[in-house]
Image (cartoon, coloured by chain):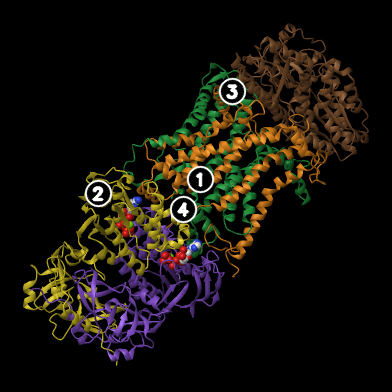
Chain colours: A orange, B green, C yellow, D brown, E purple
């Protein structure tokens, strides 16, 4: 086998292209520096989560032994198990709906001709510019009127339509060659069939990206989950994390770091596996 | 955003790069379709109830004096707006915000693009890099604030220790009013990098390989390839990242709230943070509403300008 | 009943230039109809209009007796092979081929049957589980073709479906497509650049150029009675040799250069006038015999031996003429060749409009050559053609 | 539910549910839960359900949003800065009326605490958790510098700072911008924080701290100019700075005292807030948290609420609570308990902060500021102080702060006019 | 010096099936080298390996005397026309054509000059400002070609560059590409499915199949001395008629069906053995004369008139044979035709291996026909071919 067989050669985005040796060195150098800079805070906090508070206050950030109290304390301080379940439910259900709604809307915007499309799209885009903070109070009242306070539905509902998702899907769908739609028209597929059979699989890449993103956004949300819940039955991890933080007096950094790690582990795992999936499921553009 | 212009933000016209066609390319049976609305309905309904309606209320509220609980007490016209614009701290917040946007947005995008381009190659170990670079997406603001606070701590922070270890002089990252906004920007870039990176990576990975093969044969180097092929071909995604990063920058209050609370000396008061304080701490709902409207307008104008500036450069296939 | 009728169909993409500037044609049920024309003349556009993928700017499209301008593609019950294949990258070859069959409620086992048949026909059996991107260019095209074959819709539109196949495969595909079309009684509208396909597959050919149909007829009609210079040069390969011809006392002067001696009989037969464009097909530029009346000495510019035939190029004025001779002939460049340019075999066109004034003589009314009877004299002439055995 | 307008909810065993929104994060949440559990264990009739609602401000906002409808709490814990807004909202009950209606014995409550939550003769919140800013000293450094007595004046502090600077590497004084400490210092110096006698006579319309604040700021500035000062970015930053001996003297809430004493490897002393030389300390107001009670509670729930208040403010509970959290008790009786004696035995410094409150005079100055824009006021002060940290001019900084706060007060007052 | 040398080059995409199973070839500097082979045989793959776009699994690729397995594409100084065009959707036709020239530091005015020339050559002048999506299939292909033309890199790889063009344009492009190649002294590796391109453009042709080079030689070598059955049937269109032939007392029995009478002379000339595969080119299936020795009566299955020639199909055993006759002949289906199948014109292949045993006789050593002298007897035979004038 030659050295540049499939495994060892640097290939640009799906093609068979190779990179020069010096290019490789530069690439790895840049990436390593970036990885250290970006990864350091995370590693640092993981390290912190194993360090006793007294050490932290005195500027010792590297655990001298495997100190688990911070984790024990965090779990004792807050029902993290419950919060994680809630976050997962809200994250998964919310993400699924966001994906569905965005796909449907984007599909209409790209593949279905109808009057008023432009205006609708512009309005949708404009909603992205409205600061969420000014919507919270009114939405709280709406949700309350619907009797959805302290429910998953109440947590999820206001966020299931997302400009972000619609935009990204629209972008992606516009890249689907028109011949594919035409071939489906000729084959007699209905709009919905084309949507399900061609569009959905072909935007899988975007779906994965968006699913990760939506899940993370939901997972990391603080204000709305706090406002729309009054007790722990439906609350999410971020509230748990925030609760660890002492607003008065000394914060228990170690415990907070442990909490931050606990709340970040599921999302980091998601990114890790999502990334894998993303790499595998990368659908390619059209042919010829 | 281009409500008026033919070409709009997000290239509403992009559906027709083919829209050159003057009698628009209408496939038969096209225009009378109601189906479009059916597909749009779920999103539109949600937007109407949870975004447009409350924003309409916000607009109304901005013309009123309010009780702490948000009740409208008296119509005061533009008074809320006038008060804000005569408040030097508010104008400073505008300035801070603009600086913050300028500090964070280009760097976030440039770094994300560079990393995405480098890691889009199928080289060994890329999986790890990709994971690291997108990892910050998984860190909540609350968690990030915890980490960075300890890194940036002027007296005992790790960063200063490292600097001092190499013989430099420590910096009052978050307490020096000349540094605080920069420091917050660094964190913000760190936090937003993940998402921008992931979107751009996805976009680059879905570029058809033959485009690269073609440039490879021609002999364009890294930058040529980036400039002539990658950037134009991912321009829609790039534009999108730009848009969300700008909007995100205008709307990022979590870091400020948890790290500096606007300080030192108002150096890190951003519009959104000010809005948050007035709405949720000071309970001046009328003023907060007015700020919401102003912020919307500011973002709108910036997005519009940005669209205008980039529209020729965004191509949709 | 006519399957497809186009009445004064017009199409413009930009509102300025008319890609189709008024197309009138009728395609009969069960007909194999071929569309040819230079690259960019609007063939794909017309096909897409028939498929309902493109609206028309003016005119009427009537399908099965109904006005179809606004009919949705899926209601037209047709199938199409796209010039760019239109394969779904996320589907395997199998699913690409079967795409849409279930919508048409074709039973599973029937689908499998058709799939097996089409895959066999197109040599795709080994590739059924691959994704399109792991196929070669020709394989992709075959998948597109297989989809159409499987569909068995009564109307089938094909846009250069064989362009990426090798000659051998293409030859067998020609036969198979034609056979299938006849077996199933399909109406086929077929775009091609291949002369052989055009001449052998179609019941009728339409030649498109400048947004208009230049001529519409059976292959031999087009070959033998090209309506104008454009069709004459477009049909037949190598293309017809064209020259400006003028009657002079010394003979027929081609491109102010070559003089073809004329007999009185020749002069009598000429169409009215003294100046035309004349066209000689390369295969009718014969070597002159001792008795040739119309002999002309030309200087060889170059030649190409293609195995079964040889092309010899020479200048007539500034224009290059081609002679196409059976067999392999080694001709030196610069050699003088005495060829016969018999005006009987020439087509005469109006020098301004390019319209046919007078077709080559040895063609009967039906456009078929009078040599249609295979008799012994023919055999004698042909058998003699190859060289005598070597020493 | 256990709150406002709706019918009272009951548990399976027939207890009436009292919904209680709190803002006790960190370890204080556990301590509060202990109080609640204690109450529930001894009550046959009522069950308090305690729910964390974010910060005082967030909780207050949610309370407003609920508008005493379904799901609204009967008790909501607020910070002192939220009192005026609560009163303005009209959603909270006059606790004094409840006290008399339910014959609640309020005699044991610390009068300084009652003083803060009383407006126009009526108490609007039940004091519950109290803390105040104090001065922390690195006793070892003081000893080395030869400072024998804890200073009580700015001048004393300056002198101590000079002595420290002369005798050790440690920066003498450190501060972080701590708005609550600033208005407490104004109070201690005998000044009104806001006009109309701290908003007690009439609704306040502007700030009144200008003179005292100038003294404080100038003091900081002079230290800063002398290079004897170290700024911190936050309370946490300051604690670690102090414990790592980056400064010898700093001001922070009394609530952190135990953690600081535990974390520091040196001896820690705690002293009163300073006044100007020659002036007498007026004392401080009882900041911290208190319990607002929703208006319009049913008779039954109201009774339960007051029962809970009685329990929560009882000496033993307060003593335990104080021991668990670092707050000091708001009931006089608590100071006599063994629980507290034990704590004070172990941490004598803690007594100082309680003493600072208990020795405070009782008048409209030490009633503390009543102002809906107190958070804004403090933010503006913090900003101003930070600008001084960064070398800014004192007057300019204060002018800006005053201006900003006054605008905020004016605009907020419009809404309730 | 050899421009490109492949030594035992192997390529597998999936690690199992070898798409290229050991390619050995040398391409000379300035050579026009043609690659043909059935669809999916690995032509594009080989081209992409030469371009450096695809790694090899084993073997050596040497370019300009240097081992180039790991050389980056950009260091190879070549240009390529992709089968799938690879046009940039975001660039206008102009920018697509000029793409990359600035990297090569070609001056602006030189760029403009080349652009104008290439656009003119390819008829793209009117389309320079369009985006690719507003072009027809053939126009896109021409843009891809124009890019390559402009580049003027010394090595030029072309993957079916003319497949979507009409015959007329293709004919002129053939000439232009060849002319350009000669003018600039380019080395060209050219993949095509078109027999005419293969026969006329290339200095040498390599026939690829099953991952191996089946034969490598000049066009006429391949035509006249096909190394094996595969090459024989692949080169030449319509393809060579193949049959199993057995020597029997009554003559040469084809496919156990048709008996070709043999003279003693014929028998003497046969290669060793009694059983072969024999191939007759369609143009050498002549009508029998009265004196024909090798006459055979066959029944016409179908016929195709293509204008200048007619294909007549008949069965030999279960196999379809084709006769290709000049002119237009109307032949009834089912009619009995007496044809001559002279074994002198037949290629003999080993019945098992398919290797050539004995090439058709009338070919001289150089693989050119002995009829290379244009003499009067040839003229007599050819002039006589067309029918006598009508009555
Ligand atoms: N990326 C790939 N992965 C797996 N197999 C592939 C890939 N690309 C091509 N192949 C297979 O390799 C073989 C050779 O492909 P190649 O494209 O070289 O054929 P080709 O000779 O150019 O054919 P065509 O004339 O049809 O373009 C084909 O059978 C094809 O299916
Ligand atoms: N979307 C479009 N917008 C503008 N012009 C177009 C568009 N599509 C095609 N054209 C133009 O219309 C003309 C006809 O195109 P069409 O695709 O029908 O040609 P064609 O006959 O199929 O050519 P080819 O044989 O090259 O495929 C061409 O000149 C082309 O440039
Ligand atoms: Mg076309
Ligand atoms: Mg190929």
Secondary element at image label 3: helix
Q: Which x, y percent locates residue C113?
A: 39, 56
Q: How far apart are marks 1 and 2 (CA)?
A: 38 Å
Query: Cβ–Cβ below 8 Å for labels 1 and 2?
Result: no
Query: Cβ–Cβ below 8 Å for labels 4 and 2?
Result: no
Quadrant location, ligand no. 2: bottom left
Q: In this view, does B143 lie above or below E143?
A: above
Q: Mark 3 lies on which chain?
A: B
Rendered residue at 77%/31% (across/down) = D221
In the rendered image, the residue lying farthest to the front is E249
Q: Do labels 4 and 2 share a chain?
A: yes
Identify which residue, E347 or B37, lies in the foreground. Answer: E347
Secondary element at image label 4: loop
Q: Name the residue under label 3.
A: B285
Residue at mark 2: C-beta within 8 A of ligand 2: no
Is A206 placed left or right of C19 in the picture?
Answer: right
First of labels 4, 2 by sequence position: 2
Q: Distance between the residues labelled 3 and 1?
A: 34 Å
Looking at the image, is mark 4 or mark 1 nearer the viewer? Answer: 4
Q: In which quarter of the image is residue E341?
A: bottom left
Whether residue B262 appears in this view of the structure is: no
Q: Name the residue under label 2.
A: C10
Q: Mark 1 points at which residue?
A: B239
First of labels 3, 1 by sequence position: 1
Is A160 placed left or right of D251 in the picture?
Answer: left
Q: Quadrant of residue C69?
A: top left
Q: Are marks 3 and 4 on the same chain?
A: no
Is D177 placed left or right of B119 in the picture?
Answer: right
Residue at mark 3: C-beta within 8 A of ligand 2: no
């Amino acid at each position: 086998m030659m050295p540049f067989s499939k495994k060892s050669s640097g290939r640009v985005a799906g093609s068979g292209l190779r990179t020069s040796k010096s290019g490789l060195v530069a690439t790895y150098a840049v990436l390593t520096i970036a990885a250290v800079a970006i990864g350091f805070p995370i590693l640092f906090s993981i390290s912190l989560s194993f360090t006793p508070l007294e050490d932290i206050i005195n500027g010792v950030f590297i655990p001298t032994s495997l100190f688990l109290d911070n984790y024990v304390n965090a779990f004792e301080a807050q029902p993290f198990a419950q919060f994680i379940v809630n976050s997962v439910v809200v994250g998964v259900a919310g993400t699924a709906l966001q994906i569905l709604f965005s796909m449907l809307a984007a599909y209409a915007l790209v593949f279905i001709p109808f009057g008023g499309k432009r205006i609708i799209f512009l309005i949708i885009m404009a909603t992205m510019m409205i600061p969420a903070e000014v919507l919270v109070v009114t939405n709280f009242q709406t949700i309350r009127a619907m009797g959805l306070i302290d429910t998953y539905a109440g947590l999820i509902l206001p966020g299931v339509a997302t400009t972000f998702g619609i935009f990204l899907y629209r972008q992606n769908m516009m890249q689907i060659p028109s011949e594919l739609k035409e071939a489906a028209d000729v084959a007699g597929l209905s709009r919905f069939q084309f949507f399900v059979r061609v569009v959905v699989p072909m935007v899988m890449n975007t779906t994965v990206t968006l699913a990760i993103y939506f899940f993370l956004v939901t997972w990391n949300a603080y204000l709305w989950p706090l406002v729309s819940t009054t007790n722990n039955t439906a609350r999410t991890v971020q509230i748990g994390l925030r609760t660890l933080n002492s607003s008065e007096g000394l914060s228990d950094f170690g415990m907070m770091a442990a909490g931050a790690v606990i709340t970040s582990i599921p999302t980091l795992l998601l990114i890790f596996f999502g990334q894998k999936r993303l790499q595998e499921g990368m659908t390619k553009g059209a042919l010829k | 955003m281009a409500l008026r212009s033919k070409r709009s933000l997000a290239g509403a016209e992009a559906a027709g790069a083919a829209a050159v066609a003057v009698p628009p390319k209408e496939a038969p049976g096209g225009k009378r379709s109601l189906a479009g609305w059916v597909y749009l309905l779920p999103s539109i309904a949600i937007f109407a109830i949870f975004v447009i309606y409350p924003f309409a209320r916000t607009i109304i509220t901005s013309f009123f004096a309010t009780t702490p609980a948000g009740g409208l007490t008296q119509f005061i016209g533009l008074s809320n707006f006038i008060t804000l614009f005569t408040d030097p701290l508010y104008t400073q917040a505008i300035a801070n915000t603009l600086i913050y946007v300028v500090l964070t947005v280009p760097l976030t995008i440039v770094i994300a693009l560079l990393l995405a381009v480098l890691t889009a190659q199928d080289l060994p170990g890329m999986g790890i890099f990709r994971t690291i670079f997108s990892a910050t997406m998984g860190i909540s603001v609350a968690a990030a604030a915890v980490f960075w606070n300890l890194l940036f701590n002027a007296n005992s922070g790790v960063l200063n220790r490292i600097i001092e270890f190499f013989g430099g002089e420590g910096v009052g990252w978050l307490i020096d009013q000349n540094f605080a906004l920069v420091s917050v920007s660094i964190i913000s870039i760190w936090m937003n990098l993940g998402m921008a990176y992931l979107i751009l990576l996805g976009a680059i990975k879905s570029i058809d390989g033959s485009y690269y093969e073609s440039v490879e044969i021609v002999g364009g180097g890294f930058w040529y390839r980036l400039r002539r092929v990658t950037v134009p071909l991912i321009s829609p995604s790039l534009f999108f990242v730009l848009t969300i990063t700008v909007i995100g920058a205008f709307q990022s209050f979590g870091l400020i709230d948890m790290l500096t609370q606007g300080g030192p000396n108002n150096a890190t008061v951003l519009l959104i943070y000010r809005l948050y304080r007035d709405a949720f701490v000071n309970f001046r709902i009328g003023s907060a509403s007015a700020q919401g409207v102003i912020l919307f307008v500011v973002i709108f104008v910036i997005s519009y300008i940005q669209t205008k500036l980039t529209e020729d450069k965004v191509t949709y296939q | 009943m006519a399957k497809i009728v186009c009445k004064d169909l017009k199409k413009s993409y930009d509102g300025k230039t008319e890609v189709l500037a008024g197309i009138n044609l009728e395609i009969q049920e069960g007909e194999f109809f071929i569309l040819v024309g230079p690259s960019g003349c609007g063939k794909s556009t017309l096909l897409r209009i028939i498929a309902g993928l493109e609206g028309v700017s003016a005119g009427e499209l009537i399908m099965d007796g109904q006005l179809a301008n606004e009919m949705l593609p899926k209601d037209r019950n047709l199938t199409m092979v796209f010039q760019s294949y239109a394969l779904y990258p996320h589907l395997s070859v199998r699913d690409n081929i079967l795409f849409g069959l279930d919508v048409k409620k074709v039973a599973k086992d029937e689908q499998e049957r058709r799939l097996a048949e089409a895959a066999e026909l197109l040599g795709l059996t080994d590739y059924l589980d691959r994704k399109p991107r792991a196929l070669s260019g020709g394989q992709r095209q075959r998948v597109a073709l297989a989809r159409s074959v499987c569909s068995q819709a009564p109307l089938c539109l094909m846009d250069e479906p064989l362009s990426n196949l090798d000659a051998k495969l293409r030859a067998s595909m020609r036969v198979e497509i034609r056979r299938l079309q006849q077996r199933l009684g399909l109406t086929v509208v077929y775009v091609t650049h291949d002369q052989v396909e055009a001449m052998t597959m179609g019941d009728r050919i339409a030649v498109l150029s400048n947004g208009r149909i230049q001529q519409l007829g059976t292959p031999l009609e087009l070959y033998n009675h090209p309506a104008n210079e454009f069709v004459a040069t477009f049909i037949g390969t190598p293309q017809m040799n064209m020259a400006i011809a003028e009657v002079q006392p010394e003979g027929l002067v081609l491109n102010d250069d070559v003089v073809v001696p004329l007999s009185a009989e020749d002069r009598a037969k000429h169409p009215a006038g003294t100046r035309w464009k004349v066209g000689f097909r390369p295969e009718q530029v014969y070597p002159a015999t001792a008795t040739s009346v119309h002999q002309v000495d030309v200087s060889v510019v170059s030649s190409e031996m293609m195995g079964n035939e040889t092309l010899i190029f020479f200048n007539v004025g500034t224009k290059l003429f081609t002679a196409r001779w059976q067999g392999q002939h080694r001709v030196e460049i610069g050699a003088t060749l005495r060829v016969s340019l018999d005006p009987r075999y020439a087509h005469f066109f109006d020098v301004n409009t390019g319209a046919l004034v007078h077709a080559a003589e040895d063609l009967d009314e039906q456009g078929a050559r009078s040599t249609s009877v295979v008799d012994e004299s023919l055999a004698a002439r042909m058998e003699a053609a190859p060289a005598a055995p070597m020493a | 539910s256990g709150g406002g307008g709706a019918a009272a909810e009951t548990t399976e065993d027939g207890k009436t549910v009292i919904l209680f929104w709190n803002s006790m994060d960190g370890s204080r949440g556990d301590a509060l839960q202990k109080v609640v559990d204690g109450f529930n264990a001894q009550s046959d009739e009522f069950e308090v359900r305690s729910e964390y609602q974010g910060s005082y401000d967030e909780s207050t906002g949610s309370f407003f949003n609920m508008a005493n409808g379904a799901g609204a709490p009967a008790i909501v814990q607020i910070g002192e800065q939220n009192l005026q807004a609560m009163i303005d909202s009209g959603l909270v009950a006059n606790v004094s009326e409840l006290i008399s209606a339910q014959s609640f014995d309020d005699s044991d409550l610390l009068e300084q605490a009652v003083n803060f939550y009383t407006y126009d003769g009526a108490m609007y919140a039940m004091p519950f958790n109290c803390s105040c800013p104090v001065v922390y000293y690195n006793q070892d450094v003081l000893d080395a510098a030869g400072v024998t007595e804890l200073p009580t004046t700015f001048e004393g502090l300056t002198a101590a700072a000079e002595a420290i600077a002369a005798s050790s590497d440690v920066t003498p004084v450190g501060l972080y911008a701590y708005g609550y400490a600033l208005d407490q210092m104004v109070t201690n110096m005998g000044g009104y924080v806001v006009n109309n006698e701290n908003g007690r006579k009439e609704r306040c319309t502007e700030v009144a701290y200008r003179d005292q604040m100038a003294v404080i700021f100038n003091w900081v500035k002079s230290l800063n100019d002398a290079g004897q000062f170290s700024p911190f970015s936050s309370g946490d930053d300051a604690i670690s700075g102090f414990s790592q001996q980056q400064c010898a003297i700093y001001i922070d809430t009394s609530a952190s005292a135990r953690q600081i004493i535990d974390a520091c490897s040196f001896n820690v002393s705690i002293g009163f807030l300073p006044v100007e030389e020659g002036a007498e300390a007026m004392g401080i107001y009882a900041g911290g948290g208190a319990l607002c009670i929703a208006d319009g509670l049913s008779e039954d729930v109201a009774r339960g609420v007051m029962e809970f208040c009685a329990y929560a403010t009882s000496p033993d509970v307060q003593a335990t609570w104080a021991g668990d959290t670092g707050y000091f008790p708001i009931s006089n009786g608590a100071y006599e308990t063994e629980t507290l004696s034990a704590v004070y035995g172990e941490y004598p410094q803690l007594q100082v902060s309680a003493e600072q409150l208990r020795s405070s005079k009782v008048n409209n100055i030490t009633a503390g500021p009543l102002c809906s824009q107190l958070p804004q006021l403090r933010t503006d002060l913090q900003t101003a102080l930070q600008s001084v940290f960064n070398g800014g001019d004192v007057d300019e900084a204060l002018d800006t702060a005053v201006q900003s706060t006054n605008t905020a007060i004016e605009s907020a007052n419009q809404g309730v006019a």
